[in-house]
Amino acid sequence: MNDVRALDLPFLGAERVLACGVVPVEGGVALVDPGPSTVLPALEDGLGALGHGLGDVRALLLTHIHLDHAGATGTLVRRLGVPVWVHEVGARHLARPEKLIASATRLYGDRMDELWGAFEAVPEASLRPLAGGEAVEVGGRALDVAYTPGHAVHHVAYFDRATATAFVGDTVGMTAPPSERVLPVTPPPDVDLEAWPASLDRIAAWEPERLFRMHWGASETPAADLAAFRTALDAWAARVRADRADADADRGHQAAAFSSEILSGLDADLGAEAAAPYRALLYPDASWHGLARALR
Ligand SMILES: [Zn+2]
């Protein structure tokens, strides 16, 4: 039985942009990627609709610590005192978030508060650092951990054996049902194009029956998604590589041109309504810069 639930966390009014994974465990639930603190009320409401309260949360499992995935972690730990599973590099930043906040502020500037809200440090005693290769046990439920760099150097994925669900964070890009279009998300600063294919191989080796993405929810076509993602990532990397070969070009203009091509292509292919969740999240100009940095 597939008892894993996708909890939609409307983000700036947009649905199907952020999905927290809710995994039933003994005595409550574990949450995979709780989201930013701006969506905490939605998280609480959503848990209520599933018959749970915040007090039923037994553990947080983070795929990585970017603010859209993990911004509320410190606030939740302060309120609930639950353990937090996270890659060891991410754990250091959660304990001392100054660098993470500075890096995000370079990307989002004065929209930080509106987008993400408070970001509180996580006490070291609550952190359960991972390297990849472990099996974690949360309330009688076993999840395997794989180190999956590519989107971020501190990225892990989890495999819930009971449902053959792979929680892949942003390692297999984003999608926005009902559209099945899979697109990469490659913001600066630590995209790794050399490590990424092996991360996809690790996920494929689990032979998952479904992928669960924060953006957005469960996909029942893991093999097709993995293939589509590899193709899209290769295409984006080839495009940015070609842009960079033009030594005299203005990088900002190249990123802007890439962005408007991607977004207008989505509008044309999917229609404005179906393209809206992609627009809310993608920022292809940031992905251009993330790839350019990786290719330097
Ligand atoms: Zn994300």
Image: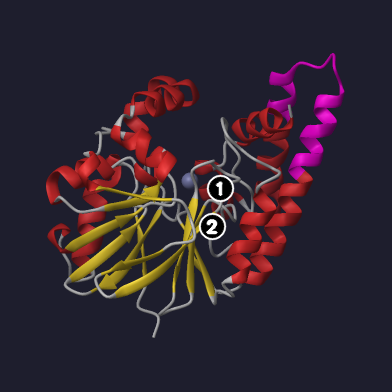
Can the viewer see residue 181?
Answer: no
As drawn, 257 above or below 269: above
Pointer 2 residue: 176
Can the viewer see residue 203?
Answer: yes
Q: Amino acid at mark 2?
A: Ala
Pointer 1 residue: 278
x and y, in percent, of residue 52 in the image: 17, 67
Alpha-carbon neighbours of circle 2 within 10 Å: few (<14), some, or many (≥20)?
A: many
Q: Quadrant of residue 153?
A: top right
Counting residues from the start of the chain, the first of labels 1 and 2 encountered is 2
Tag 2 secondary structure: loop
Does 34 appear in magenta?
no
Q: Quadrant of the C terminus?
A: top right
Q: Quadrant of residue 239?
A: top right
Q: Nearer the viewer, residue 140 or 112?
A: 140
Snapshot colouring: secondary structure
Identify the magenta region: 236-257
Residue occupying image coordinates x 24% and y 53%: 83
